Image (spheres, grey):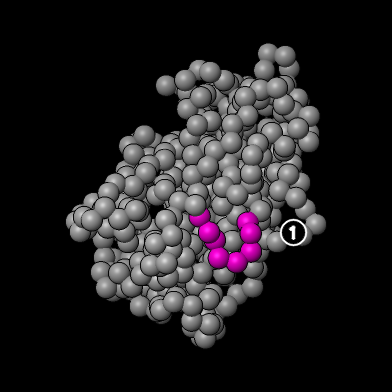
């Protein structure tokens, strides 16, 4: 099977940008990734664009703006996991021998306020079972019951991620907070306070994938590359997407199936298990992780679902300080969604951009020393979960 490398990455900061369109942001990210990879017109043979709210042909609009069309351009939607899904499709196309270089990018300009999704039936939204703080709170309460998590643990996740976000120039929130302030922020749905919830926002991210056998900056036979020193490539060890199995609604197995069996694995666990097998590693081999922290409890739940700790041990891992920079398995050194905010289509690829910099060793103040194996994880409506493993 053909190995796949990441030859270039680009990003548009996450935040709110009234003066920029979704296409503007996509162009910034795509140009950055193409420049790193040394690609010009004709340098890639297909493009996959991740977006959930971008509208029809979002990818075409971005590439039309820079005059790089004519190849297949496919828009991909899988909720917050859209970028992971697009990456999986791009890598699969290279491994199948269809292309040697593809562009994968994600764009989003989220509406302000509560996220609405056509996935949910009206009765589910009215019952608090949509992608809302009420649902996140129910899930948090279950985690507190099963894993000994307290509000103090939830606050500590926010403190950690906001501290990490201070040095991330692409994050929306770049100031530290303390636990007292987190717990003093407005209660939204018990046990979640306002600062424990991420902010839907805007942004874009892009990645150039190439077959490992292609030369540096390789593109098409027509000469779609430029010379010069290129950044070190990072190997894409796995890019996996999994959907839910029927089970408990609090296990993101929506819509409810009527089953009460708590042993049904979550889609994140299914994706992680498959990704570890594909990459030939285990969770013990990871040096750095970017995971879904839609809310503070979601990050703690991810520790267990990804195998970073045994079931029921998220609180202990948090207390140990293992997931902070300097700990044995740093999680969300970018600041996570709690610092960056979440533009759905760009979210997973934004994690990949962060981890590529980590593995290159150029992540600045947030560098995890000696990082060689990294994992990115997102969960989107459907329910979809993506897990990406990167190595160097």
Q: Is residue 212 above or below residue 136?
A: above
Left or right of 228 in this view: 3? left
Q: Residue furthest front?
A: 122
Please say whether residue 106 is visible from this viewpoint: yes
| Nearest to the observer: residue 319 or residue 33 | 33
Q: Please name the residue shown 77% across and 53% down the image.
A: 20
Magenta region? 110-117
Q: Please name the residue shown 64% across and 68% down the image.
A: 173
- Residue 373 coordinates in the image, percent (x, y): 45, 45
Q: Is residue 146 above or below residue 291?
A: below
Quadrant housing residue 336:
bottom right
| Nearest to the observer: residue 230 or residue 278 | 278
Q: Please name the residue shown 26% across and 65% down the image.
A: 312
Q: Residues within 10 Å of mark 1 (few under 14, many from 20)?
A: some
- Residue 266 coordinates in the image, percent (x, y): 31, 52
Left or right of 42 in this view: 368? left
- The kind of secondary structure element at disc 1 is loop
Q: Is residue 54 above or below residue 298?
A: above
Which quadrant: the N terminus? top left
- Residue 11 coordinates in the image, percent (x, y): 67, 47
Q: Is residue 365 above or below residue 38?
A: below
Is 116 included in the stretch rendered in magenta?
yes
Q: Please name the residue shown 53% across and 42% down the image.
A: 77
Quadrant housing residue 256:
bottom left
What residue would you read off at disc 1? 17
Q: How many marks?
A: 1
């Amino acid at each position: 099977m053909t190995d796949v490398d990441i030859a270039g990455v680009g990003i548009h900061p996450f935040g709110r940008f009234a003066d920029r369109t979704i296409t503007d942001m996509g162009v910034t990210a795509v140009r950055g990734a193409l420049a790193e990879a040394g690609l010009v017109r004709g340098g890639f043979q297909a493009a996959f664009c991740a977006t959930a709210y971008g509208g029809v042909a979002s990818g075409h609009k971005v590439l039309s703006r820079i005059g790089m069309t004519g190849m297949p351009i496919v828009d991909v939607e899988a909720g917050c996991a859209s970028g992971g899904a697009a990456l999986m499709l791009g890598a699969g196309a290279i491994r199948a021998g269809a292309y040697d270089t593809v562009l994968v990018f994600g764009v989003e300009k989220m509406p302000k306020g509560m996220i609405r999704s056509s996935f949910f039936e009206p009765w589910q939204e009215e019952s608090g079972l949509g992608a809302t703080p009420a649902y996140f709170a129910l899930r948090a309460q279950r985690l507190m019951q099963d894993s000994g998590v307290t509000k103090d643990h939830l606050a500590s996740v926010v403190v950690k991620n906001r501290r990490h976000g201070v040095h991330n120039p692409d994050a929306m929130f770049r100031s530290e907070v303390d636990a007292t302030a987190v717990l003093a922020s407005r209660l939204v749905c018990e046990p979640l306070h306002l600062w424990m919830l991420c902010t839907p926002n805007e942004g874009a991210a892009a990645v150039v994938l190439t077959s490992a056998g292609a030369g540096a900056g390789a593109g098409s036979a027509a000469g779609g590359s430029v010379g010069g020193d290129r950044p070190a490539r990072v190997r894409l060890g796995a890019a996996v997407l999994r959907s839910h199995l029927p089970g408990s609604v609090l296990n993101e197995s929506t819509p409810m199936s009527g089953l009460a069996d708590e042993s049904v694995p979550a889609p994140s666990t299914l994706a992680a298990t498959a990704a570890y097998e594909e990459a030939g590693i285990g969770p013990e081999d990871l040096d750095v992780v970017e995971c879904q922290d839609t809310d503070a409890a979601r990050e703690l739940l991810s520790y267990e679902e990804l195998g970073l700790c045994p079931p029921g041990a998220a609180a202990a891992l948090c207390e140990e300080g293992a997931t902070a920079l300097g700990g044995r398995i740093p999680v969300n050194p970018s600041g996570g969604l709690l610092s960056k905010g979440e533009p759905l289509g760009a979210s997973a690829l934004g994690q990949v951009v962060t981890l590529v910099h980590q593995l290159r060793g150029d992540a600045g103040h947030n560098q995890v020393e000696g990082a060689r194996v990294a994992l990115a994880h997102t969960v989107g409506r459907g329910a979809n979960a993506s897990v990406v493993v990167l190595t160097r």
